[in-house]
Amino acid sequence: MIPEPFEYEVAESADHALELLGRFGTDAKLLAGGHSLLPLMKLRLALPPALVDIGRLSDLSYIRDNGDAIAVGALTCHEDLQFSDVLKQHCPIVSHAAGEIGDPQVRHRGTIGGAVSHGDPAADLASVLLTLDAEFVIHSTSGDRVVPAADFFKDLFEVDISTQEMLTEIRIPKLQGAGWSYQKFHARAQDWAVVGVAAVVNRSNGSIDAAVGLTTMGDTPLRARAVEEALSSGADVATASQEADRDTNPPDDHMGSAGYRRELSKVLTRRALEESLSR
Amino acid sequence: MARTEQAQRYVGGGVLRKEDPELLTGQGKYTDDIVVPGMVWAIVVRSPFAHARINSVDTSRAGGMPGVIAVYSGADLASEWAGPLPMAWPVTEDINNPPHWPVAKDKARFAGDAVAVVVAESRAQAKDAAASVEVDYEALDPVVGVEAALRDGAPLVHDEFGTNKCYTWPLADGEVDDVFAKAPVVVKERYVHPRLIPNAIEPRAIVVQPVPSQGEFTMWSATQVPHIAKVTLSITLGIPESKFRVIAPEVGGGFGSKLQVYAEEAICLAVARRLGRPVKWVEERSENYLATHHGRGMIQDMEVAATEEGKLLGVRAKMLVDMGGYLQLVTPGIPLLGAFLYAGPYSAECYSVEFTGVFTNRTPTDAYRGAGRPEATYAVERIMDALARRVGKDPAEVRRMNFLPPFSEPTPTPSGLSFDSGNYEATLDKALELVGYDELRKEQAARRESKDVKQLGVGLSTYIEMCGLAPSQVLASLRYVAGGWDSATIRCHPTGKVTVLSGATPHGQGHETSWSQIVADALGIPFDDIEILHGDTAVVPLGMDTYGSRSVSVGGVAIHHAAERVKEKARKIAAHELEVAEDDLEFADGKFQVKGAPDKAKSIPEVAFSAWTAHNLPEGLEPGLEETYVFDPPNFTYPSGAHICAVEIDTDTGKTEVVRYIAVDDCGTIINPMIVEGQIRGGVAQGIAEALFEEAVYDDNGTLLTSSMATYAIPSAAELPRFTLAGNVTPSSTNPLGVKGVGEAGTIAAPPAVVNAVIDALSHFGVTEIDMPATPERVWNAIQNAKGGSK
């Protein structure tokens, strides 16, 4: 519960944060809400020599209607996502999923940027943003680049942000009336998902056009492409849901065996699709 | 003095806790709040291996790090110990009782065993240096499970015994084998109690302040047992008891985990003696999971013999109990606290239980809320349901036909002990009515009929427990090396205020409130004029501390008796001053009144002033008004109750939700209903936790996998239902207050109620057994297996 010694600087702006990262070198870490990083440091599982605290960059905490998409600042906390009228109107699945994270204390400190940058496949918002085909704005001294969600999550705890870059904004397409659901299965309200399933569904010409995302079913958040394809080929929900665990690699530990997680993914996919279609 | 209003009756009233203003406003002082000038910090270096030979410990690099004052290996500190850490309950004459040194010297016997100590000017410096202590371990094969430990060729936790068996303790009464051989029905089941981690919200903490010139030591410790710690640590350290003071300041929960005398207490004393400086150690939460003792960890082979109708004939049970790597203070005796309860509140002709303690390479086990009684109750109440299924009767009916009839005087029971009082059937009836039992059964039938994805189950637990530890002579017969009494002193100050010294040591129970209620009623003193002191061996020298729901029925009764003694002396003084015979006085409305002339009266404060001035005392009477009573109870107390749980199970995912929970308890006379309710609510929550959520999971290497609050699933309010609480009091025949105790009732009653409900919900699929905790995956697997398995 006592971390190793480390250096600490407070960033005054995004560019100042990049400057500090440049000064501290590649092992330095950005500190946002600290809800993943600090526990790892206290357990001495993460040993960054320096932290650049971006938690006070209030100009990166916002939720804006940009027409087709909602722009969310990377330092927006989960609590703000949960109760945002803009998100509730245009991307209610994001508000809902944010409200499923941790407990109220966590939701007041944890940020959307921190949650996705950590690259944890158990992060609820990561699979939801993947399902929504969100875009990630990555800032560096050479300017901004925009990465689609499908390319953002690279591996376990690895996303497409270099050590000299920072995530500043997430652009979330509006649902435009599509049905949606996020089914999170956990033993306790504050727990990580044993499995989570996000669904966004439109009916078109008698078949179902769906995007389905999976939480804690592999090394990164995943899309259940087999389910999506089965539905677009006309399969019914129950049949398509049986494809939920195809090409997944769920963890096998005392929080849930891989086999159980596979079965859960099918049940939750069916429930997510049914709920989406009822909305 | 003006006539006072009629004395208010506090006992039984909903008095707010007098502890709370201080605690709720952050003014409570816990051990970690204690700072002593010149204080240094200790950090314990712990074995990462469950079982390893310690070839060498190189402290040189750590010793040179910033701020480091000293680094000690087990060998370095060996000369400090006058004896090993205390083990106070050698349950059999031939028990294998290994020496337990505060810092391991030869072998590490569980992951978390102390192997070195770093002392530095700051906690962070000590922590940093701890990583640089170089221990040469030779990893050995670990012993992880109790059954594996007993197999031939199993690695030995303690080589000197040639076995991992610690002891076998039998208890038998009646013609057991004969009854079972002839019984028309025998039901046998195997039950497993997971290891549980107590998780008091305040981790352990210790500050030792030495006075080197005097050879004196003061130790503040987050402990439930300052008095026991003082006696035992004085033996371990060779410090004269007269030079050793132990203080338990505010203590943030214990649940049995602080009913212990720990290595770190001995270490801090030894280091303070070596360095001549005050030493502080505060447990990290991750250490708490490894180095604070665990609870439960028992396999039960439970059998009952019965008639075709379901009438109980006999009980026969064999238990394997996980001791862990060492025997702590009362490790071997914990199962014995339930050994007399394996027939529950039922009659039976014969009785046999046998416990075998087994060493494993895991954290030592010891008392955890309920200690032995949850284990017994679980076996009894689970098998009553199994018996009901076997004879085709409703579980309520099978219980009803086996209950001991109502009684109010000591009554012999199948295990040989005499219960104090009870009316078990009436308690069950009340619970059945409150839960709406018949309606629930109808709803259950409807859901089965419609193949609802959410199936309903109802579980009963009509428990009996045993507390008020304990008649000292009974403890002697069980080979416990201490007594079971407790003390109280009531000091009436000349100004009318009263100070009570109590040998019980609260750590959240609200003794200051309950004791004040008892004294206020007994002496007619305003509630707010009474101060309760406890938990400091210099202030209250005589005490046996708080555990096992004993405080009210031993320490509380001692207060009652001390108050009677105060009144006895006060009556002499009052009679003398009023110039009447003692027999002409009656104590009413908080005063001694002359019979027939109530205006002629003396209150206790008035008498206390007279006793202080000593101007006009009866011939030969000593000045002052202060009395002590040490109460050694003549019998245990036996709280009982009926808990009923209703669960809904999502049969697609296996997730259980507790939808209704009814608790009807008989804890004897209630001093403070709000405190009693709080105990039951917290206890039931902890019992539901065992049933559905919590388990210390180890891998094959003996590494604890559930080593944090993220992975060890303590439920929160979000996972728990609203509880419906009620009572059915039968005053105890063991003590004049009629109190029994309530601290553990919930953890004792709840697990079988919940698991019976889970199995009841799935019984139509053919499910008969699910181990605790009944996690979603376990429930889901049970459903799949019973259905013949789609997988």
Image (cartoon, rainbow, N blue to C red):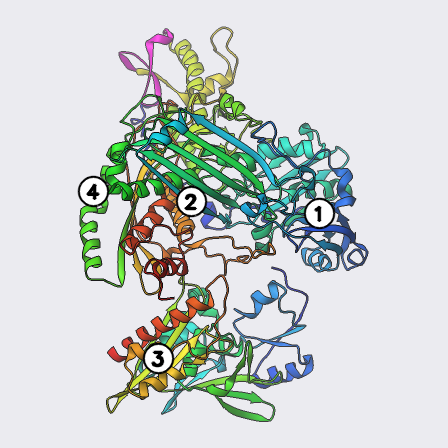
- 2 or 3: mark nearer the eye: 2
Going by the image, does B86 lie left or right of B426? right
Mark 3 neighbour density, 10 Å: few (under 14) some (14–19) many (20 or more)? many
- In three-dimensional space, the C-alpha distance between marks 2 and 3, rounded to whole angstroms, equals 44 Å
Q: Please tell me if label 1 and label 4 are on a single chain.
A: yes
Q: Which residue is mark 4?
A: B433
**Residue carrying label 3:** A199
Please tell me whether mark 3 sits on a helix, a strand or a loop.
strand
Chain ID at mark 3: A
Chain ID of residue with mark 2 = B
Which of the two labelled residues, at mark 4 and mark 2, occupies the earlier sequence position? 2
Say the numbered circle drawn on residue B190: 2
Please determine whether, in this image, residue A66 is positioned above or below residue B666. Answer: below
Q: Amino acid at mark 2?
A: Arg
| Mark 4 neighbour class, 10 Å CA radius: few under 14, some 14 to 19, many 20 or more | few
Residue B526 shows up from this direction: no
Tell me if residue B596 is in the magenta stretch. yes
In this orientation, which residue lies closer to the viewer: B168 or A66?
B168
Give the spatial CA distance, label 1 vs label 2: 34 Å
Give the residues in magenta.
Answer: B579-598
**SS at mark 1?**
strand
Residue B107 is tagged as 1
Q: Quick one: label 1 or label 2, which is nearer the N terminus?
A: 1
Report the mark closest to the observer, 1 or 2: 2
1 and 4 marks in contact (CB < 8 Å): no
Is disc 1 in the same subunit as disc 2?
yes
Respond whether the residues carrying marks 3 and 4 are from the same subunit: no
Q: Amino acid at mark 3?
A: Ala
